[in-house]
Image: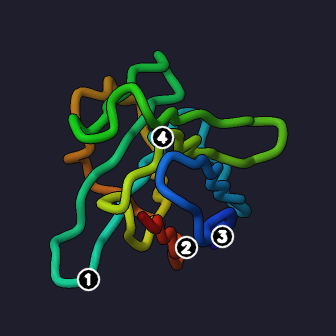
């Protein structure tokens, strides 16, 4: 069974940085897509960023372009979301997701099979 565990969330002041990590286990697909999503109270889940292992194509939500960076370390079975210049509106629970397959990422609209439990990010002004 695939398990994803997020970490790295917390409380940070506006303008600060956090790096979220998502440790994966039980994942044996040769090709896969990784996604980071977030959901703030009272709002719908939002795709933040996705990346394909096959060609490295990425997607970023307009609101995070230039501030967030998605990456993965295959040797460590870990995916990351580097968040810089954080704003209060970035406050949300952040979820990592993964699915097997060969994708060209143009959005995060693909179906992800496996999800983590989320990590809280709170940005204070």
Based on the displayed image, in which of its 4 quarters is residue 57 positioned?
Answer: top left
- Foreground mark, 4 or 3, reads 4
Where disc 3 sits, the SS reads strand
Report the residue that reaches farthest toward the top: 55
Of the pair 115 and 18, the residue shown nearer to us: 18
In-front residue for pair 23/39: 39
Residue at screen point 53% across, 33% down: 31
Asked whether, in this view, residue 40 is left or right of residue 28, the answer is left
Q: Earlier in the sequence, mark 2 or mark 1?
A: 1
Q: Specify whether residue 58 is in view.
A: yes
User: How far apart, in angstroms, are the residues tagged by discs 4 and 2?
Assistant: 19 Å
x then y, percent, for residue 64: 33, 39
Q: CA distance from mark 1 to mark 3?
A: 21 Å
Circle 1 SS class:
loop
Residue indicated by mark 2 = 119
For marks 3 and 2, give the CA distance: 9 Å
The C terminus appears in which quarter of the rendering? bottom left
Residue 5, disc: 3
Name the residue: 62% across, 55% down: 20
- Classed neighbour count for the residue bearing mark 3: other residues with Cα under 10 Å, few (<14), some (14–19), many (≥20): some
Q: Which residue is mark 1?
A: 41
For the residues carrying marks 3 and 2, which lies nearer the camera in this image?
Answer: 2
Indicate which disc residue 85 carries.
4
């Amino acid at each position: 069974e695939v398990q994803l565990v997020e970490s790295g969330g917390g409380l940070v002041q506006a303008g600060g940085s956090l790096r979220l990590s998502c440790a994966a286990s039980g994942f044996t697909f040769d090709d896969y897509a990784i996604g980071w999503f977030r959901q703030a109270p009272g709002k719908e889940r939002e795709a933040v960023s996705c990346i394909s292992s096959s060609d490295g194509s990425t997607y970023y939500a307009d609101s995070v372009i230039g501030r967030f960076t998605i990456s993965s370390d295959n040797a460590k079975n870990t995916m990351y979301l580097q968040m810089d210049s954080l704003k209060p509106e970035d406050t949300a629970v952040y979820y990592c997701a993964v699915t097997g397959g060969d994708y060209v990422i143009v959005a995060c609209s693909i179906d992800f099979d496996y999800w983590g439990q989320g990590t809280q990010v709170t940005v204070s002004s």
